[in-house]
């Protein structure tokens, strides 16, 4: 995977080519001072949030005079920077998209930070909603600081122009999302993340519908030969393009492994249904579990990193400290 492959998967690089196939969106250049604010590692103070309304009540004599919030003259009040011009542009864009949007940067959306929002969702109505998600997201930070971390070429990192992408909010059912893998302009694999009904005819119909969409709208039209694209199949069977991703480790291969995708060996394996699938058709994989309620893959981002490291054993020093603490507690008891 080269750096140009990552650049070609920026939203602004592919959206003009496939505008008619995807969700209506607005792209706004991200000012440098906004980027600096999003990367600031200080206390989380959200910019753009309006002060809560105050109720005006008549003073009740001495009672009003007794209210004192602080006697410390050195107490510092944290205030977030304001971006009035940018705020106006963002709000106008949100209004033009129906009042609610799904935000992202050039590549990533703050999916790992949905839990911090008041509605536990990525649905945003104001710039302050977007800032809260962005400042809480490791995915967004990675877009800013390590966009080419998995690239193999040694060329200097290109100068990046970051953008705020606002997509019209749509209630998408997770069970209708697919990820498709393309190598040398050939569709080699499709992944359906949720349990598919044990219906071979339905599986074949969905696979052929995705292949027809790829051949008609995507094949030979994207900027690279190797890439990954995400689609959504609505209740009427219409296919919508959602996103493009680089063909490499930076992208989640889901039910495949990257070794399988790169070598194209054992792609179908035990997942193909006898002779029902044509030899040249892409491999199709879906979960076979009967469990219909799946935990979110982003749940671990709710916890402090120390907790996650302890539970996974990734940081041996923290684990040793924890065991020592438990031993001392037992000795005290």
Image: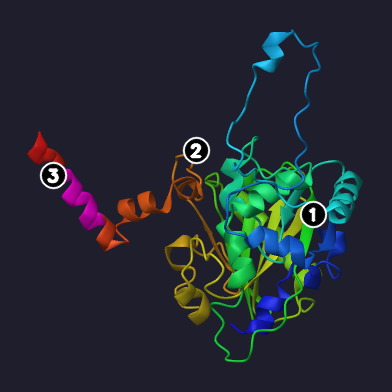
* Tag 2 near tag 3, CB within 8 Å: no
The label shown at residue 175 is: none
Identify the residue at image location x=83%, y=60%: 21
Identify the residue at image location x=74%, y=49%: 102
Task: Decide if residue 269 is in sight here.
Answer: yes
Give the labeled residue for mark 2: 293
- For the residues carrying marks 2 and 3, which lies nearer the camera in this image? 3
Q: Secondary structure at mark 1?
A: strand
From the top left corner, tell me how far across and down residue 187 is, in percent.
64, 72
The magenta stretch is 319-327
User: In the image shown, does 298 or 142 lie closer to the viewer?
Assistant: 142
From the top left corner, tell me how far across and down residue 131 is, in percent.
70, 50
Would you call the spot at circle 1 few (<14 residues within 10 Å), some (14-19), or many (20 or more)?
many
Query: If the image is split into quadrants, where does the C terminus sit?
Result: top left
- 235 w.r.t. 333: above or below: below
Give the labeled residue for mark 1: 166
Q: Is 89 placed left or right of 115 in the picture?
A: right
Would you call the spot at circle 3 few (<14 residues within 10 Å), some (14-19), or many (20 or more)?
few
Identify the residue at image location x=67%, y=45%: 122
Q: Is 284 placed left or right of 311 in the picture?
A: right
The label shown at residue 328 is: 3
Q: Secondary structure at mark 2?
A: loop
Nearer the N terminus, badge 3 or badge 1? 1
User: In the image shown, does 108 or 41 lie closer to the viewer?
Assistant: 41
Judge whether residue 82 is colored magenta. no
**How far apart in space, not on screen, are marks 3 and 1 (Cα)?**
53 Å
Identify the residue at image location x=60%, y=31%: 70
């Amino acid at each position: 995977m080269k750096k140009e492959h990552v650049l070609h998967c920026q939203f602004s690089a592919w959206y003009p080519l496939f505008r008619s196939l995807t969700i209506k969106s607005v792209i706004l250049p991200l000012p440098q001072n906004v980027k600096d604010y999003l990367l600031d590692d200080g206390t989380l103070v959200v910019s753009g949030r309006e002060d809560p309304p105050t109720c005006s009540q008549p003073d009740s004599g001495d009672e009003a005079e007794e209210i004192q919030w602080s006697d410390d003259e050195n107490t510092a009040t944290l205030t977030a920077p304001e971006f009035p011009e940018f705020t106006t542009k963002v709000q106008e864009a949100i209004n033009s998209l129906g009042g609610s949007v799904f935000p992202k940067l050039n590549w990533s959306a703050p999916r790992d930070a949905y839990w911090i929002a008041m509605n536990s969702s990525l649905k945003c109505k104001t710039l302050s909603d977007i800032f809260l998600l962005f400042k809480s997201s490791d995915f967004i930070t990675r877009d800013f600081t390590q966009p080419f971390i998995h690239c193999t070429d040694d060329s200097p990192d290109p100068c990046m122009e970051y953008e705020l992408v606002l997509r019209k909010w749509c209630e998408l059912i997770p069970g209708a999302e697919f990820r498709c893998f393309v190598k040398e302009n050939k569709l080699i694999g499709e992944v359906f993340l949720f349990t598919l009904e044990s219906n071979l005819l339905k599986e074949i119909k969905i696979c052929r519908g995705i292949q027809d969409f790829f051949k008609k709208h995507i094949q030979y039209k994207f900027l690279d030969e190797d890439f990954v694209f995400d689609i959504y199949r609505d209740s009427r069977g219409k296919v919508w393009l959602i996103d493009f991703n680089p063909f490499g480790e930076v992208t989640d291969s889901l039910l495949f492994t990257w070794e399988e995708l790169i070598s194209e060996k054992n792609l179908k394996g035990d997942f193909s249904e006898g002779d029902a699938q044509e030899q040249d058709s892409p491999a199709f994989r879906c979960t076979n579990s009967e469990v219909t309620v799946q935990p979110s893959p982003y749940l671990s981002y709710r916890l402090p990193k120390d907790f996650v490291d302890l539970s996974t054993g990734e940081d041996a020093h923290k684990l040793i400290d924890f065991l020592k603490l438990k031993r001392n507690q037992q000795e005290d008891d």
